[in-house]
Amino acid sequence: MCAERPNRRIPLSEPQLGGNEWAYVKECLDTNWVSSSGPFVDRFETEFAAYLRAPHAVAVINGTAALHAALRLAGVEIDDEVLVSTLTFIAPANAIRYLGAKPVFVDAEPKSWQMDANLVADFVTRDCRFEGGRLINLASGRRVKALLPVHILGHPVDMAPLLEIARAYDLAVIEDAAESLGALYRGRPVGTLGTLGCFSFNGNKTITTGGGGMIVTADSILGKRARYLVTQAKDDPLRYIHKEIGYNYRLSNVAAAIGTAQLERLAEAVAAKRHIAARYAQAWRELPGLSALEEASWASSAFWLSAILLEPSQFGLDRDALMSALQGAGIEVRPLWQPLHLSEAHAGAQALGGEVAEDIWARVVTLPSSAGLSSEDQDSVIRAVSEACRGRSKEGGKAS
Ligand SMILES: *Cc1c(COP(=O)(O)O)cnc(C)c1O
């Protein structure tokens, strides 16, 4: 196939900046409020909190910083263990390590691809002892302090069983909702179900501030402490008195101005992504060996990225062959992340299962899913996938 517009690629996930971003940034420049305080920081936090119906929201420089601070706020200390999804972008596991704590990787559940709560339940009941309010991992002798479920690809984790385990064993729950702003778990916004929730406004996320993040919590002590820790733990606003080691993680007013404008169109963006996902899912039903990640019974997904799962024996191509066919047609696609229990960066960490994540990783391709994706561009993606499927025997999986 000869691409009609050979120089134009269809991006995986690009931001939509056509709203009030310019006007609000101009306002920052005109008023000299450019740094890490200012009216847009307050406004972004207030409006973000209202959107999620979360009592407290603290804006920070990126999602990884949000996770780092949230883990510290949750009381995670050196040599503690934190149970985290293995099938995720690496940021949450890195944040655990920043504190000298240890990740324990939890396999995915095959239908939703999210953290498998059954493995967590088995681990806490069979492989740990609970004494004096502390959960101790029998294998390592270390304290298990928190759960860090990651809502991947816009889809919520099944939170109820995890929250129940957390209550029973006095564990903190930090939700990584970086990919799932706008998703609902049994009607409640993800990021507001655990002790603390973390979001990212990186350029490829559902809304962006260039780079940015947010910590949300219902606990007013934690909310106050979050603001304190990410502002260098200032104990006196004027006199440079500090009792603790804090971080310089506050978001700038310019970034918050972009975020405020982005937030105005969040509902629209989520609706567009849900529509894109539905259209892909419909198309894959007509091709052999393809399926979409569909919503679990508990979920209203934000469908940050639409993904297809291949059954190579039926589809005729494997993941890498499909990816190169699509790349050859000018379509930006990606695999999922290497499951973290296989990552050299976290070598030696304990893992609860892992085979399910490995299987999903080997067979999934993520597709262009920008909120602004035109239906013509989406047609091109669908056409390229069906052509790859039809051409599989003669082309051996290569783009033509
Ligand atoms: C993007 C992302 C992050 C990190 O966000 P940054 O803003 O890039 O630091 C954390 N967790 C997950 C699952 C992500 O996808």
Image: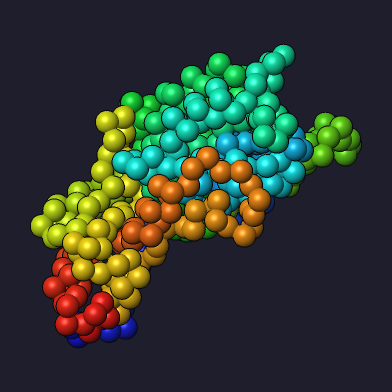
Total numbered circles: 0
- Between 168 and 55, the one lying in front of the other is 168
Q: Outermost residue, top direction? A: 132
Residue 83 visible in the displayed image = yes
Q: What residue is drawn where x is 60% and y is 47%?
A: 93
Quarter of the image where one finds residue 280: bottom left
Residue 347 lies, in percent from the top left, at: 64, 54
- Between 17 and 66, the one lying in front of the other is 66
Residue 43 lies, in percent from the top left, at: 53, 38
Q: Is residue 65 above or below residue 193?
A: below
Residue 193 lies, in percent from the top left, at: 47, 26
- Between 380 and 397, the one lying in front of the other is 397
Q: What residue is drawn where x is 34% and y is 58%?
A: 364
Colour logic: rainbow
Q: What residue is drawn where x is 32% and y is 83%?
A: 7
Residue 260 left/right relative to 243 = left
Q: What residue is drawn where x is 67% and y is 34%?
A: 139
Residue 53 visible in the displayed image = no
Q: Quadrant of the C terminus?
A: bottom left
Q: Outermost residue, left direction? A: 286
Q: Is residue 204 above or below residue 394?
A: above
Residue 328 left/right relative to 146 = left
Residue 6 lies, in percent from the top left, at: 27, 84
Quarter of the image where one finds residue 227: top right
Residue 11 left/right relative to 47 = left
Q: Is residue 353 above or below residue 129?
A: below
Q: Quadrant of the N terminus?
A: bottom left
